[in-house]
Amino acid sequence: MNKSTLIVLVSIFLMAFDNRAFFSNITEVYPLNLDNAAFLISVAVVFGAALIMILALACYRYTTKPVLITILMLSSFAAYFMDSYNTVIDTDMLRNVVQTNVSEASDLMSGTLAMYVILLGILPSLFVYRAQLTTGSVRRDILSTVKLASISLGVGVLTIVIFSNFYASFIREHKILRYYANPSFYLVSIFKFAGSAIESSSLPFTMIAQDAKAAPPERPRELIIMVVGETARADRFSLNGYERETNPELAKDDVISFSDFWSCGTSTAVSVPCMFSVYGQSDYDQKKAESTENVLDILARTGVNVLWLDNNSDSKGVADRITYLDFKTPENNPECNDEECRDTGMLTDLQEYIDAHPKGDILIVLHQMGNHGPAYYKRYPKAFEKYTPVCQTNQLEDCSKETINNAYDNAILYTDFFLSKVIDVLRRNTAEFETGLFYLSDHGESLGEFDMYLHGLPLFIAPEAQRHVPVVMWFSDNFSGVNDKALRAGKDRTMNQDWVFHTLLGLFDVRTDVYKPNLDILNISGPVKQG
């Protein structure tokens, strides 16, 4: 066969078998009935024409087979995750993929994924590989490409014109549907991601808050442990009214739980660097964040001893210039088994670190594994399996909502236990320090609501479950400068991760023109949100 025929066949295959999520989302907006039938057929025609045009322009002579095989393989993976979790492959999701580790990746492996890859990736790729393509001159190949692309463009444009009334609404009001187009959307995302990475690497590094002044030396020393949680939802904390008792230990510690707190992003790769960045959610940009100092840099520069312990994938660049230890390895974490390294392992040598720093304030950041999905059942020891039965697979679509919730809530229970142990460490040091705990999750999680699972949807369309996060504070009785009554009165005030940067500066009494008192949680006052 000739190249054009092979491109058309692959395009039809991709449209027909790799786009269940795309057409499923479209039929939710335009139900399959007689009134919409012609339009829905036109969508398939336009989409198929677009794929043919994209592949025609991407394939040139001897690159044809490698390009088609690569797209078939990538699209099989994309189809699995979009079909199974109703997620989309945008630049943030690609950043998650690039920054994931072997442990996280293994949690996503499944028999269903293998079937997708075999049926939608390997088998059609073998067909492409074995196809005998006719070859001609360079001129003939270029003319063939131009002809195929032109015909495809013409068919697509003509179809849109014929159904212009439908497409005017479709394009204007339902832009999100294009996010599910496989492979066109992830191909655009790949180019954007690559361009962003190249641009970031060329940006000069910027220091901020160069006027920052350390706390007065006569002030008592402070020891703050900040816990960056993973994938925890605010509505699953009994401290915030959840009917299950998922925070029995924290309730005993009389902590302050902030009930209306919202994340900067819906993935670790966005939320973690964003919360430590001077740029608020509205101004946040990955390129700017990577090339600019964060709040930990400022604190370290003013004399605070800053340590980052990580039981997650990594710090996403936040801890690049401070002391960092990886606790995903048995060499550092004494509480590792064949499947998991426990968050509590990060507490083993904390006292040794504290004792080794007899001068200056101390900030220790603990980056949890927390509730990282989809294998929630792995995130806690068996002793914390209070709610049963539990979903014991990473294929959440095969589990009932009850078993998913049970496994997820058990992991929240373990986080509650972990945080209570952090408070125990702080209590043991109150003779030498004013001590405090600052816990917040990086983002939330979808657990099957609206047929969505996990997280990572673009922020503007992400459901509340992926953005509404738990935040908890605890301070020792000797901690000066904390108005406990005002904090409790303002605990239901609407806040977001923009407040983290300025709260950390405020906790350590670092004064700089960059600091905004109105975004410091310790300064909250005024009317509380009603209802």
Image: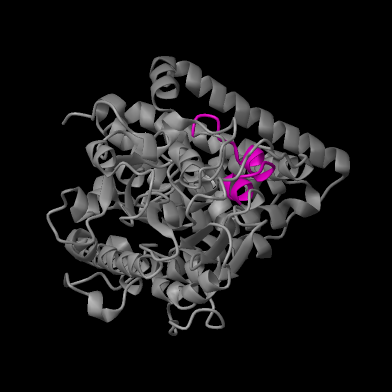
How far from the left and from the top, in percent, is residue 8? 60, 44
Q: Residue sitting at 31 percent across and 36 percent down?
A: 27
Q: Residue sitting at 46 percent across and 53 percent down?
A: 79
Residue 140 seen in render: yes
How far from the left and from the top, in percent, is residue 451? 28, 49
Q: Residue sitting at 61 percent across and 31 percent down?
A: 152
Q: 420 or 464: nearer the eye?
A: 420
Q: Is residue 457 above or below residue 97?
A: above
Q: 269 or 27: nearer the eye?
A: 269
Point out the stretch of residues depicted in magenta: 281-299
In the rendered image, residue 297 lying in the magenta stretch gets the answer: yes
In the rendered image, residue 439 lying in the magenta stretch gets the answer: no
The quarter of the displayed image where residue 44 is located: top left
Scheme by which the image is coloured: one colour
The C terminus lies in quadrant: top left
Q: Residue sitting at 56 percent across and 83 percent down?
A: 331
Residue 181 seen in render: no
Q: Is residue 529 above or below residue 381?
A: above
How far from the left and from the top, in percent, is residue 414? 29, 69
Q: 443 or 217: nearer the eye?
A: 217
On the picture, is 76 further left or further right than 112? right
- The single residue placed furthest to the front in the displayed view is 218
How far from the left and from the top, in percent, is residue 161? 49, 16
Q: Is residue 254 above or below residue 484?
A: below
Q: Is residue 217 above or below residue 461?
A: below
Q: 345 or 517: nearer the eye?
A: 517
- The single residue placed furthest to the left in the displayed view is 243
